[in-house]
Image (cartoon, rainbow, N blue to C red):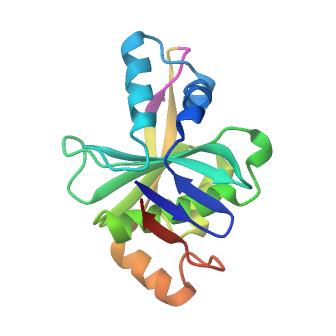
Amino acid sequence: MTAVQGPRVTLRAFRPEEIEDAMRRMGGGIEPSNGGQSMRRRARLQGSGARNDWEVLFAVEAEGRLVGDAQGRCSDHAMPPGVWEIGIELWDPADRGRGLGREAVAHLSTHLFEHEAAIRVQATTDVVNSPMRRVLESLGFGFEGVLRGFMPTGEGTARDYAIYGITIDDWTTRRLERGVWGLKERARTRER
């Protein structure tokens, strides 16, 4: 198991006693619509903290409590080798806007570049999600365009999403200029 511990945020495996809560809260609190989806989500949570065929999933812990989830996805069937897509969700709105998401994205991206042979890390977010867009831009991710009609909604329409990316070369340059993402302390990655 891998854990990434930073100044305020730790990325780690979900603990067995956290699985049910995470089942309810992941994906914006939308329960999987069928038994197969539910079983897959449970299996992902149980295997968190370690890379599987297509993803590494982490619990996001801050202030000694579980506050969300973060994942990196790199499927051989969907992405070129070394290209990772990341996602993060802080479940309680009170935990947003405090820098926890920024630190989690920074540590996840660093982990992917340093330990998962990433050559590129990318993220998408709703075009109206200004806070997430600012987080990505503050970490050096470049805005690369709008994916029109990208994310389906429950109303039968699809939302436009902005895509951001950072390459290993950009990350290395930024690290040399500012330290690790401009954070005061470097995160420690440890294998358990």
| Coordinates of residue 24 in the picture (x, y in percent) | 60, 24
> Residue 135 falls in which quadrant of the image?
bottom right
- 28 vs 54, left or right, is right
Q: Residue furthest right?
A: 94
Pick whichever, 143 or 78, lies toward us: 78
Pick whichever, 18 or 141, lies toward us: 18
Indicate whether residue 153 is drawn in magenta.
yes
- Examine the rendering and report whether any part of residue 135 can be seen: no
- Examine the rendering and report whether any part of residue 95 can be seen: yes
Q: Could you tell me which quadrant the C terminus lies in?
A: bottom left
Q: Could you tell me which quadrant the N terminus lies in?
A: bottom left
Q: Residue at x 69, y 64 (%)?
A: 8
| Coordinates of residue 142 in the picture (x, y in percent) | 48, 65
For residue 101, above or below residue 171: above
Indicate whether residue 61 is drawn in magenta.
no
- 102 vs 172, left or right, is right
| Coordinates of residue 154 in the picture (x, y in percent) | 54, 16
- 98 vs 121, left or right, is right
Q: Residue at x 54, y 31 (%)?
A: 19
Q: Residue at x 25, y 48 (%)?
A: 79
What span is colored magenta in the figure? 150-155
